[in-house]
Every structure is written in C-alpha cells, then in structure tokens.
Amino acid sequence: MKVHHLRNATMVLEIANKVILIDPMLGEKGTAGPPFTLFRFKPKRNPIVDLPNNAMNIVEKTTHCLITHLHPDHLDKVGEDFLRNRQIPIICSLKDEPILKKRGLNVLKTVDYWKPTDFLDGKIQGIPAVHGYGFVAKPMGNVMGFYIEIPNEKSIYLSADTIYTDDVHKTLTQLKPEISVVACGTAQLDVFQPLLMRMDDILKFVKNAPNQVIANHLEAVNHCPTTRQQLKNEVSKMGLSDKIFIPNDGESKTF
C-alpha cells in the first residue's frame, strides 16, 4: 500500500491496483471557506496553504473516493466538482448518502457502523467518530471513521475527525489495524472545547495503536493550532517517534 498525504485530511491510498481519494479539499489557498475562528486564532480563509505541486497528478488517477463527513475542510466545492464531473464512485456513511446524491455525486456504496461491507475484494466497516469534547460534538454532526481490510494489503484505520473514545480504543486494540491514521490538529473554535484530540489523547492513540500511525489534519486550516514540530517533540518525549509518520504536504510512503 502506498499512502500519499496531500493536505489536511486529504489523502490518496494506492491499494489493490485502485487509487482511493479520501476527503478531497482540492481548492486553492483561501477558497474552501471562511476562517473557523475570529478571536482564538488569527482569522485566515481556509485552507491556509496551497496544495503541493504534485497533488493533482496523483488525484487525477482516482478510481474511488471515501468521504468521512461533509465539512468544507474535508469536501470543498472544487473537490465536489471533481467528483461530480468524473462521476467518481463514492463510499460514504449511510447518513451522508442523501445529501451527496442530491448534489449529483455518484454514491457507489454506503457503510454502517460496525458492519463489514464488501469493498475492493475485501471489507470496509464504519467506526463511530465523535467530532469534539462535550457539547460541541452535537452541532458538528455525523462523522464516520473507516476500517479497511483488503487481501494481501495492510489493514488501515482512518479514524477521521474524532476525539479518543471507547470505539476508537476498541478499534485499535481489537481490530488491530496495521496502519492507523489520526487527525492531530486539535482543532478549536472561538468557543467550546476542542473538536479533535488534545495532545494527551493523540499520544494515547499512538501508544495504543498496535502498529504504524500516520498523523494528518496539521497546519492547513486556521483553527488547528498544533504544529508538526510540536507533535514530533511530544512523541519523542514518549519514545514513540519510530511509531508515527508525520508527513509534510505532498509526501508519500509505502507500507
């Protein structure tokens, strides 16, 4: 399996001769949406960085798309247009299907929580995700992580935008993914608690993951204060540096 990290949560998996695009935010810097904070962090239109130069060459090869949820930093207008114009087959949560179909997108398959569904000669199942600590998770809406098992490929857990929950723990310790992807930006609005794992929970995720971890959702949207360097420093203190891959935008790795 080859993993390409493009920007934020936008990734590409080359797996079983297929090219799977995940959460496509493909627009230029400042085009996906307004700032998510005005006071807590300096307001900048999102995304705050451009796609890396090699991104669209990789994206053009897309055969399938996985969407974890519908926030604009995971599916922007340019990403939506790309999927619609090419009628790329989409795999998504049962709850997101009506909206995506209404937007003219080609939903090939829907996934339910904890129910393995056929996918590329293997299986995919939905893993519950909670997009924030406390009250804020409710207005943030539905999010789904995915656990994918394809024969002769490493199993991968895309935890999506979530805090550390019993479901996340269960996935790491019982399903034992060979690769686990975690959103590390500790996103936060002007009010309420963080929308993503705080550093202590990120470190817990890395520690409890049975194998390699990939960090994403870093340094691409204005409400995510955690930097790659901060994360590197913290995992180093815990002696976990060898366990986590913290890619730069445009970086790839074969597992």
Image (cartoon, grey):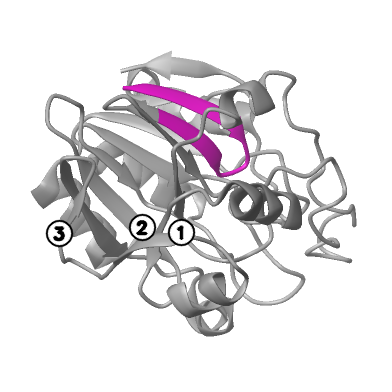
Q: CA distance from mark 3 to mark 1?
A: 16 Å
Q: Mark 1 Cα within 10 Å, few/some/many (few <14, many 20+)?
A: many
Q: CA distance from mark 3 to mark 2?
A: 13 Å
The residues colored magenta run: 1-13
Residue highlighted by disc 3: 116
**Residue 113, horizontal then vertical, whole percent:** 24, 69
Residue at horizontal 65 percent and vertical 50 percent from the top: 85
Residue highlighted by disc 2: 145
Residue at horizontal 13 percent and vertical 24 percent from the top: 152
Residue 68, visible in the rendered structure: yes
Q: Identify the amino acid type marked 1.
A: Thr
Query: Is 22 left or right of 52, judged from the image as shown?
Result: left
Query: Is 202 left or right of 29, judged from the image as shown?
Result: left
Dot 2 falls on a residue whose secondary structure is: strand
**Residue 149, horizontal then vertical, whole percent:** 18, 41
Q: Mark 3 Cα within 10 Å, few/some/many (few <14, many 20+)?
A: some
193 in magenta: no
Q: Is residue 206 above or below residue 201?
A: above
Q: Out of 112 and 97, give the one closest to the viewer.
A: 97
C-beta proximity under 8 Å, tags 3 and 2: no
Q: How many marks?
A: 3
